[in-house]
Amino acid sequence: MDTGTPRRAHSIEELAQVMGNLAPSEQLLASSVPLAVRPSDVIITPYGKCGTTMMQQMFHQLRTARLGGDMDFDDISRVVPWIETAPALGIDVNAEQVAEPRGFKSHLDYESLPEGARYVVTLRDPKEAFVSMYHFFSGWFFEPGTIELEEFMPVWLMGGPSGLNYFRHLLSWWPRRDEEDTLIMDYRSVIADKRGAIGRLAEHCSIDADEAAVDLVEARTSREFMVANAGPFADPMMREMSEEKAGLPANSDSAKVRAEDAERRALPQIISEQLDAEWARLVTPVTGHANYAEMAADLTG
């Protein structure tokens, strides 16, 4: 794929090369300074495409609501840093932030994160998370239409370099749902009752939030607001780095926050059945839930 001209992947093999080019070097990992956790720190750590950006924005607007909120940032992960990518982006995770409490983004499981913080996780139906990740990669890492959903499925199931896939992440956090330091919510329930979710997050993070604050946060976490202000929510720092390290074209049309009427590929039956089988094999024996809908109902009470 080394053509010298910026180019997205056109096959699964080329996509693997792109992702390999973006992996941090052993030297960088060895020189990284770990997060020195404070008891007030909040780590927002859903699995990829399960509500992370919305929760970053909800948290940041909550902690700045008394000042009228804050949209003076070019990347939401500059004000709520992404722990895993901070070293590669030159971000000091131990620096002071624009407001208290400090907040961080992650996609890690509980065992891979430092202890002593407060954790926030939104869970999402694996079928929705898979399709959302496919569309997120399309137009950024691979050329739209060149990789089919069926081809992408093994990539998604494999997870990242550590093997942390959707199911391992879920099974790490589910036992902690009643722990005082952990707030776990269903993604769809957050959207359906945004004000209730804002209140739960504020309480979990020890942030005072009156009606005016909740109004502001609700407005600024709406799909309409985040689509209209899409730039800071589209991983601009990571995109710039990916263009440099993996030779990807600039101005990707992939987006994290998509309009309600954005194109969504239908999930093929074979993938739906495969995800059902993985759930039955991995999740049901541990949690007793036959499917995600049962888990979400249990979570929301």
Image (cartoon, rainbow, N blue to C red):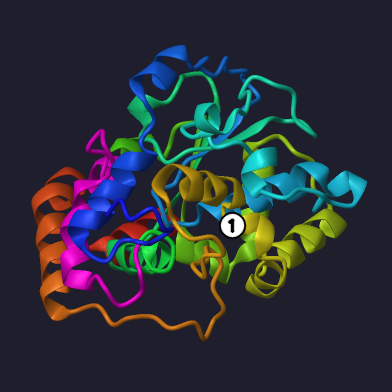
Image height check: is 271 above or below 126?
Answer: below
| Residue 290 can be seen in this image | no
Q: Residue at x 12, y 56 (%)?
A: 278
Q: Is residue 186 magenta?
A: no
**Secondary structure category for the residue under label 1:** helix
User: What residue type is disc 1 on?
Assistant: Met
| Residue at the image position 40 percent from the left and 51 percent from the top | 48
Q: Quadrant of residue 191?
A: bottom right
Task: Tell me which segment is drawn in magenta.
Answer: 142-171
Q: Position of residue 230 (x, y in %)?
A: 66, 65
Is 23 situated left or right of 79 in this image? left
Numbered-mark total: 1
Q: Quadrant of residue 300?
A: bottom left
- Image location of residue 78, percent across then percent down: 67, 40
Q: Residue furthest front?
A: 4
Q: Is residue 162 magenta?
A: yes
Q: Who is closer to the viewer here, 54 or 231? A: 231
Q: Give percent across and percent down for residue 197.
A: 61, 56
Q: Which residue is mark 1?
A: 54
